[in-house]
Amino acid sequence: MEPGIFVGLLAFILGLVTGLPIVWVFLGSSLTMLFFSGSPFTFIAGTFYHSLDSYILMAIGFFILAGSLMADSGIAEKIVFFSNILVGKIRGGMIAGGIVATLFLSALTGSSVPCIAALIPLLVGPLEKYGYDKRYTTAVLCSSSYLGYLIPPSVPVLMYCVIAKQSVAAVFLSTIIPGLILAFGYITLNFFICKNYTHPVKNVVVVHDLDKKGKIRACINTLPALGCPVIVLVGIYGGICTPNEAGALAVIYTLIVGVWYYRGLSLKKIFSSTFSAIISMGMIFGLIGIGTVFARILIREGVAQMLAEFVLGMFDSKILVLLMLNILLLVMGMFIDGVPVMVIAVPLILPLLSSIGINLVHLGAIVVINLGIGVVTPPYAISIFVGSRLSGVPYEELVPIMLLFLFIVEIPVLLLVTYIPALSCWLPTLVLGTKVVGTW
């Protein structure tokens, strides 16, 4: 390895350890590597520009804005009501309703944090009155926020497609079945353990005790909220519009429904949501641009090739290579946010996994699932930080409950998707064909 690369990687590790913003860590490490290797700094400008010269990034911006508007529109309350009608009668049904609501909100927001921000204030306090422990409700909602990474339209999937140059439609479809399996696993585990976190209450009327007309009225009132993902998916898979145009339609639809139907979006909230979306987009685009510079320097200096040769020299089995990949991504996700993990890891592992015949749509599902687990895995877990702040439950009280969901549901689903490609590739192949998805 070139001395400049070694010094740059050392600077990267020191930057992470000292807690510097990850964008500056990427930039400082890149400058260090270029300086010690004697390469011109003009490499940074050209690579930064070309990394952001992608139409898919426009789709990311539109979906982030649509999700931000959706979270502030009051739609979450209607979805929670509808979800409780669907599953409220089973044991732990109010919590199961929260999980189903997360599933729906994932399709509306495309990420994890908006789901938590919308549902925790809405559910944690009221569910205490129904006998549910505040710690448990918060922990389950934080864990199920992971669904925001899997149910399309998904911002992390769009980012993977930018980096790996894959079909957005195919990778969107690749995470649907894993997401549904995960939601079913959450509901099943909740069914068995919720009794340990509840206490009896009296004289409380729940949603599923409504009469038939009340339930029908609630369902009809929720339909406009669920129209956004339908428009996006029908538009993309029906060949009516591109992902960019679908994102723009999602923003327009959300504004119409939020302002004129549910009347939850005021002018002040629209400005606030737009400002929040711009901040998020700036962070993501900056990370993609500078992170791509960092990754390209490593690839140019042969680090990706060295990694491939090292791994293939140690493991002669595809099973072991995929296991090592999962361990690497899970460990990185425990300490670094999902965006930089994807920007660093995907360009480096693509040559290795292509050489052993891993389908890149399948790889997209594996990567996105790993990054989603990182969002809910301590010590650095953005979902726990946000959930703790919103609910007032200390971080350390959420972790033991969330670890149950991690080891009993999330890790098994990850392994199933890793070693059964049909779970991620069958649906894209059925809809789009082998020419788009490739062999698996």
Image (cartoon, helix red, strand yellow):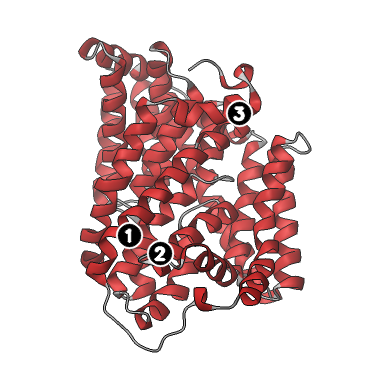
- The answer to which of marks 1 and 2 sits earlier in the sequence is 2
Distance between the alpha carbons at the discs numbered 1 and 2: 8 Å
- Residue 349 image position (x, y, % from top left): 38, 23
For the N terminus, the quadrant is top left
- Left/right of residue 256 with respect to residue 271 in the rendered view: right
Total marks in image: 3
Q: Amino acid at mark 1?
A: Phe
Q: Nearer the viewer, mark 3 or mark 1?
A: 1
Q: Residue at 38%, 56% (x, y): give it.
A: 187
The secondary structure type at the circle numbered 3 is loop
Quick check: marks 1 and 2 in contact, CB under 8 Å? Answer: yes
Q: Residue at x 69, y 73 (%)?
A: 262
Res 173 visible? yes
Look at 50% across and 68% down and name the residue there. 84
Question: Label 2 amino acid?
Answer: Ile
Q: Which mark is residue 191?
A: 1
Tell me whether circle 2 and circle 3 mark residues in contact (CB < 8 Å): no
Determine which of the numbered discs, if any, sits on residue 167 in the image: 3
Amino acid under label 3?
Ser
347 vs 182, nearest the viewer: 182
Mark with earlier residue (3, 1): 3
Q: CA distance from mark 2 to mark 3?
A: 39 Å
Apparent side of residue 289 relative to residue 303 in the rendered image (left or right): right
Name the residue located 35 percent from the left edge and 32 percent from the top edge.
416
Residue 137 image label:
none
On screen, 1 above or below 51?
above
* Residue pointed to by mark 2: 90
Residue 259 in percent (x, y) is at 73, 71
